[in-house]
Image (cartoon, rainbow, N blue to C red):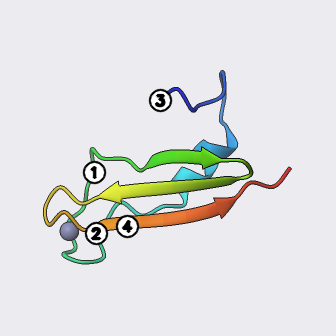
């Protein structure tokens, strides 16, 4: 992903660690999957699409300095 800052653990990585890869709709555990991040200013929106039932989940965080 081009969004990632260079090297090390970024704030985006730390936020991603807090996101659950298990689908809330069907319970599918998306072990190989990941949330995709889109940033807009101080806000980052993560999106995950379940490969089993195609449910879309989104989480938005504010990046603290
Ligand atoms: Zn699902």
| Measured Cα–Cα span from mark 2 to mark 1 | 11 Å
The residue under the point 36% across, 57% down is 48
**Comes first in the chain, label 1 or label 4:** 1
**Comes first in the chain, label 2 or label 4:** 2
Numbered marks: total: 4
- Mark 2 lies on a secondary structure that is loop
Would you say the residues marked 2 and 4 are in contact, meaning their CB atoms lie under 8 Å apart?
yes
Camera-nearest residue between 43 and 20: 43
Q: Quadrant of residue 60?
A: bottom right
**Comes first in the chain, label 2 or label 1:** 2
Name the residue beneath numbered marker 1: 31
**Comes first in the chain, label 3 or label 4:** 3
| Measured Cα–Cα span from mark 1 to mark 4 | 16 Å
Q: Which mark is residue 1?
A: 3
| Measured Cα–Cα span from mark 2 to mark 4 | 8 Å
Q: Residues within 10 Å of mark 1 (few under 14, many from 20)?
A: few
In x, y percent, where is residue 29? 24, 61
Camera-nearest residue between 41 and 59: 41
Q: Quadrant of residue 55?
A: bottom left
Q: Residue furthest top?
A: 6
Q: Nearer the viewer, mark 3 or mark 2?
A: 3
Q: Residues within 10 Å of mark 4 (few under 14, many from 20)?
A: some
Ligand 1 within 8 Å of disc 2? The answer is: yes
Name the residue beneath numbered marker 4: 57
Q: Ligand 1 lies in which image quarter?
A: bottom left
Name the residue beneath numbered marker 2: 23
The residue under the point 30% across, 47% down is 33
In x, y percent, where is residue 22? 31, 66
């Amino acid at each position: 992903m081009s969004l990632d800052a260079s090297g090390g653990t970024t704030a985006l990585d730390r936020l991603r660690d807090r996101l659950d890869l298990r689908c809330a709709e069907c319970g599918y555990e998306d072990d190989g999957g990941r949330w995709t991040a889109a940033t807009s200013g101080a806000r980052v929106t993560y999106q995950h699409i379940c490969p089993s039932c195609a449910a879309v989940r989104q989480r938005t965080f504010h990046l603290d300095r």
